[in-house]
């Protein structure tokens, strides 16, 4: 209760902050009307007082750098001290409910229905991944396929055709093998040959053994491609959008090869398999142009998830340790410039390609970038109803953007993890460490949450 009182005592400060935000970035004059992301009544109408208070507390905790940087250690330590039972009692109604959709079909259904009421679609995020050196066995990869197919069915069940499912290539094929393939496919024409050969295999053709892989690795590759094929074919059958996540630069080349081969096999009539483009990378724009060209050469659709990128600090650290040039942009402003330029270019491509051959998701919590995308959509005459340009935010964050966009008729997804508390939390804490920049930047959202609480408790 003392937290509520302290929240309610800050009205002047909060009003000042909102006025500042409104006059700078959150309000834009468009030819048709103004969209304001400061509308807390719309943003939180679907949440109870308790949920709003929880969101404020959790986002406040997430703004502490120490907790974000050490979240996995804090989690492990708390489990030792408190035991799993007590820890679950604390974390389930707080951190877990704030960021996770649930751990069974019923709880997922409740989350989906709650979001549906305010026009938000689910983008399920399986908590599956692997890094170099953590090689899983075949059973693990096969079980990851099962989980992915189940989640694809759930996504379809709740959202029908064009529902989104995120996937990580490293959950389906060994990261070590991907690394080896990336090193051997640096040249553009080599990449195209590999992509065409894998696409052909996934479309039912034969796979020629790869000369630089030994017999075991060739078998491993074929099994991996078989898994990519199962997931791609299933998503295509249900008319889903399968969004392949971008990971670390040392794996991204091979991830792109895998994603584009899936696109070659399954994007014949429209983009089913989409790749992710991280705009904090210096070469983001060139990468998009090059991959777009590859899909055009194959005569298939192109789908792109545009993000700023989650692994900034680690990328920089790796470049220092490995003594190679930093692959990331030198500043936040440079990343934002690339982000907005990439979105603008792809929206023009949506129009150039006649609509359904190019689809884009603007995955960002940045109001300016979202507003720029909206302005560009309007100037190009792209209607939200075309379902070619959509938006995405992480579940539990930036409701002021997500709900407002949905209320204006835009197609918006919430990326939401699904799984049991002790499976999902380590995954979430890794994501929290990686997404520190976003979590630390939730001040404005906390202000809006506080405003809404004040309105509900005091009526103004
Ligand atoms: C639906 C969805 C899917 C996602 N999928 C992926 C994915 O597949 N792969 C992935 O990596 N991330 C993914 N993300 C996470 C995404 O990258 C982060 O949410 C994003 O980086 C935060 O940027 P923003 O546009 O929301 O906000 P902002 O808060 O405006 O931007 C913060 C970002 O700016 C960049 N940045 C910050 N400081 C600097 C600096 N000094 N120099 C250069 N750049 C800087 C970093 O990328 C940082 O994360 C996804 C997010 C969503 C919503």
Image: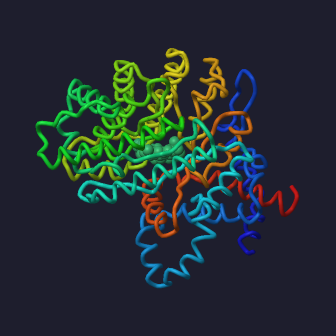
Q: Would you say 420 lies left or right of 135 here? A: right
Q: Would you say 358 lies left or right of 291 here? A: right
Q: Would you say 201 lies left or right of 336 here? A: left
The image quadrant of residue 433 is bottom left
- The residue nearer to you, when weighing 247 against 385, is 385
Q: Position of residue 325 (x, y in %)?
A: 24, 41
Identify whether 354 is placed above or below 401: above
Q: Position of residue 256 (x, y in %)?
A: 33, 36
- The residue nearer to you, when weighing 409 against 316, is 409
Q: Position of residue 358 (x, y in %)?
A: 49, 24
Q: Would you say 142 lies left or right of 270 here? A: left
- The quarter in which the N terminus is drawn is bottom right
Identify whether 297 is placed above or below 173: above
* Snapshot colouring: rainbow
- The quarter in which the C terminus is drawn is bottom right
Please identify the residue farthest to the right as the structure is shown. 459
Q: Position of residue 296 (x, y in %)?
A: 38, 19
- Residue at horizontal 84 percent and vertical 63 percent from the top: 457
- Residue at horizontal 40 percent and vertical 72 percent from the top: 73
The tally of labels here is: 0
């Amino acid at each position: 209760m003392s937290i509520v009182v302290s929240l309610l005592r800050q009205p002047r400060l909060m009003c000042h902050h909102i006025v500042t935000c409104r006059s700078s970035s959150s309000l834009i004059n468009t030819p048709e009307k103004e969209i304001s992301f400061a509308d807390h009544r719309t943003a939180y109408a679907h949440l109870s007082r308790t949920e709003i208070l929880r969101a404020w507390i959790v986002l406040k905790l997430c703004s502490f750098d120490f907790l974000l940087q050490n979240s996995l250690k804090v989690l492990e330590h708390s489990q030792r001290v408190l035991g799993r039972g007590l820890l679950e009692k604390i974390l389930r109604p707080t951190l877990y409910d704030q960021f996770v959709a649930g751990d069974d079909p019923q709880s997922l259904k409740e989350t989906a229905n709650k979001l549906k009421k305010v026009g938000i679609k689910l983008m399920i995020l399986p908590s599956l991944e692997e890094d170099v050196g953590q090689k899983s066995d075949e059973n693990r990869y096969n079980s990851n396929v099962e989980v992915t197919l189940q989640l694809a069915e759930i996504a379809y069940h709740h959202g029908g055709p064009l529902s989104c499912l995120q996937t990580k290539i490293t959950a389906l094929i060994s990261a070590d093998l991907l690394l080896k393939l990336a090193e051997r496919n640096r040249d553009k024409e080599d990449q195209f040959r590999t992509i065409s050969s894998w696409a052909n295999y996934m479309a039912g053709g034969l796979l020629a053994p790869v000369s630089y892989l030994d017999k075991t690795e060739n078998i491993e590759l074929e099994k991996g491609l078989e898994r990519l094929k199962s997931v791609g074919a299933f998503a295509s059958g249900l008319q889903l959008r399968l969004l392949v996540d971008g990971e670390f630069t040392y794996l991204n080349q091979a991830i792109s090869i895998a994603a584009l081969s899936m696109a070659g096999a399954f994007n014949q009539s429209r983009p089913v398999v989409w790749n992710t483009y991280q705009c904090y990378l210096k070469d983001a724009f060139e990468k998009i142009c090059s991959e777009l060209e590859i899909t055009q050469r194959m005569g298939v659709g192109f789908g792109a998830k545009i993000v700023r990128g989650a692994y900034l600090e680690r990328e920089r650290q790796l470049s220092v340790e490995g003594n190679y040039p930093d692959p990331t942009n030198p500043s936040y402003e440079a990343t934002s410039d690339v982000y907005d330029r990439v979105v603008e270019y792809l929206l023009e491509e949506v129009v150039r390609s006649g609509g359904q051959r190019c689809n884009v998701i603007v995955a960002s919590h940045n109001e300016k970038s979202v507003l720029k995308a909206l302005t560009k959509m309007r100037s190009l005459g792209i209607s939200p109803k075309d379902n070619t340009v959509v938006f995405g935010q992480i579940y539990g964050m930036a409701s002021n953007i997500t709900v407002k966009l949905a209320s204006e008729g835009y197609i918006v997804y919430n990326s939401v993890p699904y799984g049991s508390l002790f499976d999902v939390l380590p995954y979430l804490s890794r994501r929290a460490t990686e997404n520190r920049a976003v979590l630390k930047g939730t001040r404005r959202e906390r202000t809006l949450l506080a405003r809404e609480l004040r309105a509900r408790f005091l009526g103004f």
